[in-house]
Image: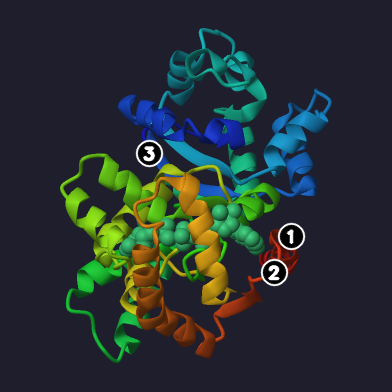
């Protein structure tokens, strides 16, 4: 390690997390090495302990409720940064201050428009080490600082690589492209990339109330609602090359090829940084879509199935059709959608029921009655 190499840490709480891409890009442009990053969930007790550790010994630890709330309301992103003369870089990037302490508490907000208590950083060797040890108890910071590559790899990459290789060996049906498979495995299982966001699928016949119930779940559980149908309609209107195909398939109540829908879902999920999980409405409509989703995006918690008689759904959709402007809210398309639902989507429902990954509610009742049942599953799971 060069004489004046310095390790620092940076902790971004919820408000600052939205700027993480720019911040990381700026740091890298200044030749900072992001040696490690991890999403950290702090409970009340740990948030207070962190603030205590962060404050200078001669200062009163600052437990302002607001600061603690910012640290606990959502996962924070913590980074270990390395660079020669790191304090000078932090100073240059984040404020125009001159003293070390100003750098540590200073005007990060100037460049990124963030409140000062939405981030914490330090380049003081001992304080940074203490904070890093506290934030990442399993990280071998000592070896990292000593720049021992072997030990660094052993404490970071090797465990997940080993478990990926073990899984690969155990698979009865070996993947056609093992390196690609392994790459996906590493990304999906890397605890440092992102906190695992829970994914819930919402299925039910057309008009069973999926969108309506999702709105209520979003309000109570702050999950991100993504409707596969809405994403396809948006894609169609954007003038994409798939536009005509999607348009025709929606009118005929057919299922759009899974790779198109999964790509749209993947992009929408990646854009979403704030939510703690996803409600994916109207997906998977076909058995192979579920497998492809798990392979390319990740595992899900359960499928919520809204069970509703066809006559009731038909009435609801005809009523909605008076105002929705949807090309498929007419009797001809509605009947085709019912047929597709029974022939193609019910097998998905039955498959996951048999694997205990499905919960079912009677969706023929009033919106409130249905929701009362649904929320119990989410209270248990979130
Ligand atoms: N429990 C309910 N009782 C009566 N009407 C309802 C109920 N739930 C939803 N609706 C109404 O039925 C119509 C369809 O509901 P919604 O759009 O939520 O269904 P969906 O399953 O998302 O439909 P689609 O699959 O066609 O997108 C809407 O007009 C909605 O207001
Ligand atoms: N996974 C999906 C979801 C939807 N579609 C097509 O969109 C139509 C409307 O879907 P809603 O969920 O909004 O009712 C649906 O009938 C399909 O044509 C799809 O192909 N795949």
Dividing the image into four quarters, tell me where ligand 1 lies.
bottom right
Residue 305 in sight from this viewpoint: no
In percent of width and height, residue 101 lies at 64, 17
- Which circle's residue, 2 or 3, is located before the other in the chain? 3
Residue 145 placement, left or right of 251: right
Q: Residues within 10 Å of mark 1 (few under 14, many from 20)?
A: few
**In the image, which disc is placed on residue 368?**
1
- Within-10-Å neighbours for mark 3: few <14, some 14–19, many 20+: few
As measured in the structure, the alpha-carbon distance from the residue carrying label 3 to the one carrying label 1 is 63 Å
Question: Which residue in the protein does label 3 denote?
Answer: 1
Residue contact at pointers 2 and 1, CB within 8 angstroms: no
Q: Is residue 43 left or right of residue 184?
A: right
Using residue 308 as the reference point, say whether residue 19 is left or right of it.
left
Q: Secondary structure at mark 1?
A: helix
Residue at x 70%, y 51% (from the top left corner): 220
Image quarter of the N terminus:
top left
Q: Which mark is residue 365?
A: 2
Of the pair 128 and 366, the residue shown nearer to us: 366
Query: Within the image, what quadrant is residue 370 found in?
Result: bottom right
Task: Tell me how far mark 2 sits from mark 3, CA to CA.
Answer: 67 Å
| Image coordinates for residue 42, horizontal then vertical, percent | 69, 48
Relative to 358, say whether 368 is above or below: above
For the C terminus, the image quarter is bottom right
Q: Secondary structure at mark 3?
A: loop
* Number of other residues with Cα within 10 Å of mark 2, as a class: few under 14, some 14 to 19, many 20 or more: few
Tell me which residue sits at (68%, 67%) in the image.
374
């Amino acid at each position: 390690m060069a004489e004046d190499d310095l390790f620092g840490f940076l902790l971004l709480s919820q408000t600052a997390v939205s700027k993480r891409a720019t911040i990381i890009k700026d740091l890298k442009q200044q030749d900072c090495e992001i040696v490690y990053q991890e999403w950290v969930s702090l409970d009340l007790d740990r948030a207070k302990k962190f603030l205590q550790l962060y404050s200078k010994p001669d200062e009163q630890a600052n437990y302002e409720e607001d600061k603690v709330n910012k640290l606990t309301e959502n996962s924070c992103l913590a980074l270990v940064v390395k660079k020669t003369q790191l304090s000078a870089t932090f100073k240059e990037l984040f404020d125009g201050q001159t003293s070390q302490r100003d750098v540590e508490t200073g005007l990060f907000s100037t460049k990124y428009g963030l409140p000062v208590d939405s981030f914490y950083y330090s380049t003081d060797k001992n304080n940074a080490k203490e904070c890093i040890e506290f934030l990442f108890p399993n990280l071998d910071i000592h070896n990292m600082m000593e720049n021992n590559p072997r030990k660094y790899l052993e404490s970071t990459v090797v465990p997940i690589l080993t478990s990926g290789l073990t899984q690969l060996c155990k698979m009865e049906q070996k993947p056609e492209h093992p390196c690609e498979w392994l790459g996906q495995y590493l990304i999906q299982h890397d605890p440092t990339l992102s906190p695992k966001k829970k994914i819930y699928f919402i299925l039910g016949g057309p008009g069973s109330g999926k969108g309506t119930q999702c709105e209520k779940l979003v309000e109570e559980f702050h999950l991100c609602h993504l409707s596969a149908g809405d994403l396809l309609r948006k894609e169609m209107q954007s003038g994409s090359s798939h536009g005509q195909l999607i348009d025709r398939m929606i009118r005929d109540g057919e299922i759009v090829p899974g790779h198109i829908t999964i790509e749209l879902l993947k992009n929408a999920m990646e854009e979403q940084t704030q939510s703690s999980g996803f409600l994916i409405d109207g997906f998977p409509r076909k058995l192979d879509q579920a497998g492809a989703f798990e392979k390319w995006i990740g595992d899900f918690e359960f499928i919520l199935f809204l069970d509703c008689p066809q006559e009731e759904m038909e009435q609801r959709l005809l009523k909605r059709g008076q105002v929705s402007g949807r090309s498929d809210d007419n009797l001809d398309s509605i009947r085709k959608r019912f047929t597709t639902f029974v022939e193609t989507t019910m097998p998905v429902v039955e498959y996951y029921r048999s694997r205990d990954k499905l919960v079912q509610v009677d969706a023929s009742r009033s919106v409130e009655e249905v929701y009362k049942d649904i929320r119990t599953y989410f209270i248990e799971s979130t």
